[in-house]
Amino acid sequence: MRYIVYFLFFINTFCAGASHIIGGDIYYDYLGNNNYKFVLTLYRDCASDGAEFDNPLMLSVYMANGSSYQTIQVPFAGSVFIPLDFDNPCATAPGGICVERAIYETVLNLPPIQGGYDVSYQRCCRGPAIVNIVNPDDTGLTLTTHVPGIETGFTENSSPRFTNYPPFLLCNNEQIIFDHVATDPDGDQLVYSMATPFSGGDSFDPAPIAPPPPYFPIQWIGGFTPQAPLGPGSLTQIDADGLLLVNPNLMGLFVVGVRVQEFRNGVLISETIRDFLFKVMDCNITMQALLPQQEDLSTFVSYCQGMTVQFENNSYGGSSYAWDFGVAEQSNDISGSFEPTFTYPGPGDYLATLVVNPGMTCTDTAYMSITVGNPFSVGWSAEDSLCILGNSFDFNLLTSNQNANFEWSFGPDANIENWTGANVPLVSFSNPGFHIISLYGDDGDCATSFEDSIFIFDEPSVEIDLPDYVSCLGLTIDFESTLINVSNILWDFGDSGTNDDQSTLGNPTYSFNNPGIYAIELIGSSAPNCIDTASVTIEVKEKLVMEIEHSDSLCITDGLFDFQATFSGPDDVSFIWDFGPNASLQSSTQLSVSGIQFSSPGFQSIKLTGSHDICIDSVESLLYVFSEPYIDFTIVDGVLCAPESAQFINLSQVEGEVLYTWEFGDGSTSTLVSPSYSYNTIGDYSVGLTLIALEGCVDTLYLLQQDLVNVYPSPTAGFSVNPKQVDVCDNEVSFINQSIGATAFSYYYDQGQFMTTESDFTHFYTQSGSDYPLQIAYNEFGCSDSIRAEVFVEPFAIYIPNTFIPDADGLNDVFLPITDFEIHEWDLSIFNKWGALIFNGREYEAGWDGTFQGNQCQDGTYIYTLKYKSCANPIEAKFIKGLVNLIR
């Protein structure tokens, strides 16, 4: 019985949570004596299989600390079906749309308390077709409102309530303006905004008693927000008057939230969020009336550009047009043109109307507010782009009405910040750069303004940056400059012998024709009459150029170096040599020096320094002194056992190109630097090395090392195994040494688990498979040899047939497992398919003949178990289980 009750409860819960919620809102009225009338409006999808409206509806009241004040059961007073508000004559509304509304009302007595009350209701679910929130089929709504506490002084308050309910069905890419205004009985200030509605309940508890706040908001899918609930590219906004502007770009079912906040004396005392749905469909509208704002007309300049307006028409899909330009008491202010031009009779505000396809079934209307005034323009002219030095501007008024009132603004950097009147003379500015000049004009009918800018160039600054010791650099000099606020420069190098001694580069290089004294001038400007000049006088001399000539690549034992200095440039030059600390003569002032010898090999740095006046220059050269060659070699340590290679290491030291010849003592040679050589014959060998140095210290050296190489005999490994094949029961194998010349042995066998140094021994194998024992044989010199053999150990095996035929023909009449190995214990049992024991044999040769208690068993499959101990492991019993087929 408990199972049935649970099942019915589950069905009821599942059905009650089905998708049906469209939206709703809640508000209250203060009735006096702490009584409040609460009105909760719900909308449901009556075309779905969702639950009916709650009866009763559970309304929860909580105090500010989250404690429950009371939960009220509000009875269901009935519902009405809401007609589909879709009057677009150019589109057909889809079928299957049904919206049902229920209004719940109750009166509660709520004495004033600190923090006030929160009154809430929750219901699930919204529906799987909603496209802008996460998991819509498991997401409900929360309708909640707040009654202010005594700390606000506004407990006697009625909350705002929305006047109209938005249309459920919209056309894609069709703009609508909906009056979503709310009213407040107390006349409080109302502020509108788009909002995120609250979620509430789920499919497991679709009609809960609402918990205390705070409440969880719905989760928007990526790309959707409270301000863009219809998704990217769509327009959804509400203005300060409660007008909701919607232009959807996507299609589907969308959750939307609109909040109205109530302020009294600047204090927020309550707010209401309306939670509702928009269904956007592809209406396939091919015609729409569209007009731009007056400011967006391509010919618009200002509202005071005259009485004539050139209208522009953004409509599409129309074939005829009817314009009414909005002139009262005038019947000829009409046109049938697509984009007419109309001249209004006088200044004022007008409302132009355009009807596309007038008189047809599918028609549309658009409106444009027009404001026209007499032409009035203002502007100014002045000289532009002056230098900061002594700048002064005269601003001249340009206007269509000299009798209007004018106000000028020149900014804080001007000596005249503001001016009233026509022309303004002698205006100067204290800082460079752009300065915005604003002019405002008012002729009584129209007001207009004009803004433009003037530019002031900053004061330029130039400096000539000469290189250090400019007189020592020769006839070609690299000039540099420091420029601040400079756009144009001109160098004059003062070279009277040519007409090409000028440059406009920032950092030029100039070559003078002759030594001498020159006046250098640099002129920089940021604008006409914005100039700075720098000048400097320099002396130009010929550059000192020196070179060192000397011999190279000499040996340290016999090298004598000669040095010669050459130079060009000034005549009054003194020289000094620096041959370094290793030279036999470390310094000299002569241009030619001979017979210098160096005490250390390697690179030697030679420096020649020349000086004249304040100029000093030097050149350096490197020469190389070769060291004497040195010969030596050795052999890598280790015992050599014939045949084996010896590795020789050349320890010789020689600089430059060299030749080597090795003699290995058996008539063989090599020219490698450090060769290896294989000796196949036992004996002692003397090794010689010849070194021939071909560069620097040219020489031939020879070194012979007596009996350097000692080659010893190697043993020959060998052994036999007997027998080569055994099994796990008969498993003894003898190892017999057959090596030659060996004095010591190492054996590794039975998969490397065992090792011995005996020459002959026996071993009992317990593991089946192939083994490859290894013998290593050693002699008294430390030489060794190795060899392997093979032993195969046959595993224990037992054969169990899967079928037998007890037909008394002497062939396969008995089911019996067979083995060639010795059996110690045996227990064979046969079971039928129900698990009943029908045979048991404890002797090895006792098999089952297919009978039970003398009766033949039926054909079929039987279960056998076999438990035995064998010679392979007499201690541990093995167990086998399987199936056998009996066939008669």
Image (cartoon, rainbow, N blue to C red):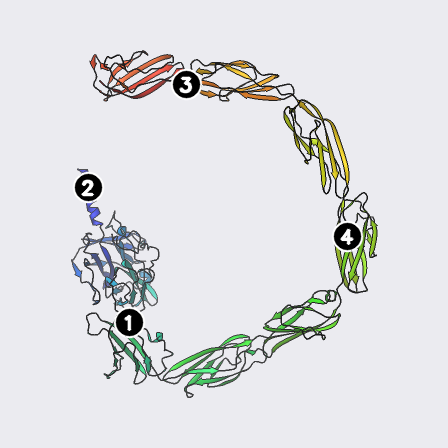
Which residue has dot 2 on it? 7
Disc 3 is placed on an element classified as loop
- Report the amino acid beneath label 1: Ser
Which residue has dot 1 on it? 315
Viewer-nearest of discs 4 and 2: 4
Mark on residue 795?
3
- Report the amino acid beneath label 3: Pro
- Report the amino acid beneath label 2: Phe
- Choose the circle earlier in sequence order: 1 or 3: 1
Residue 670 in picture, x, y percent from top left: 68, 33
829 is higher (above) or lower (below) than 638: above
Q: Residues within 10 Å of mark 2 (few under 14, many from 20)?
A: few
Give how far apart the Cα atoms at labels 1 and 2 are: 61 Å
Q: How many numbered circles does the render carry?
A: 4
Mark on residue 606?
4
Disc 2 is placed on an element classified as helix
